[in-house]
Image (cartoon, rainbow, N blue to C red):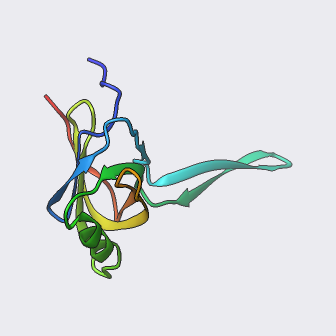
Amino acid sequence: MADVAGSLRSVSINGIPFAVSAEAGATVVLTGWENSRIAHSGGSMRKMIKRVRTVSGIVLILGGTDRASLTSLAESSADINLAFEDASGNSYMATGSIEFENWETEDNKCTLTMQAENEWTAVLAG
């Protein structure tokens, strides 16, 4: 069965659930390596660069004390618990940090990126 495409269903940061904007899709980097090739006289050589596994472009609808909570979590030097659920019902969890990118006052939404310390642990929907 194919996965269902669409926006994230839910986002939880340090155990705090946040309302996800329905029309916003996120970009997920699940692999820990960037692959490229370097040309040389005998063909090419593979170059692998370690990268951070991220979920970027997350759009949340803020309410109540959400803005203060996100600011505090983004400025924390300690790793925090991160989790999200995709449109298919698959859940992903990691420890890491967030980048609280911006807050738009007109519609009370914010954009953020979640950055895993190591990898995202998947719990696939049955």
Counting from the top left corner in percent of width and height, residue 92 is at 24, 48
- Which residue appears at 19% of the width and 63% of the height? 64
Residue 12 found in image quarter: bottom left
Judged left or right of residue 74, residue 17 is left
In the picture shown, does residue 119 fall above or below 123?
A: below
Camera-side residue of 54 and 6 = 6
Residue furthest right as drawn: 41
Judged left or right of residue 102, residue 1 is left
Image quarter (top left, top right, bottom left or bottom right) of the N terminus:
top left
- Which residue appears at 23% of the width and 49% of the height? 19
Counting from the top left corner in percent of width and height, residue 67 is at 29, 67
Residue furthest bottom as drawn: 77
Camera-side residue of 35 and 79 = 79
Counting from the top left corner in percent of width and height, residue 17 is at 17, 55
Image quarter (top left, top right, bottom left or bottom right) of the C terminus:
top left
Counting from the top left corner in percent of width and height, residue 69 is at 24, 70
Residue furthest top as drawn: 1
In the picture shown, does residue 74 fall above or below 86?
A: below
Q: How many labels does the image show?
A: 0
Camera-side residue of 18 and 92 = 18
Residue 123 found in image quarter: top left
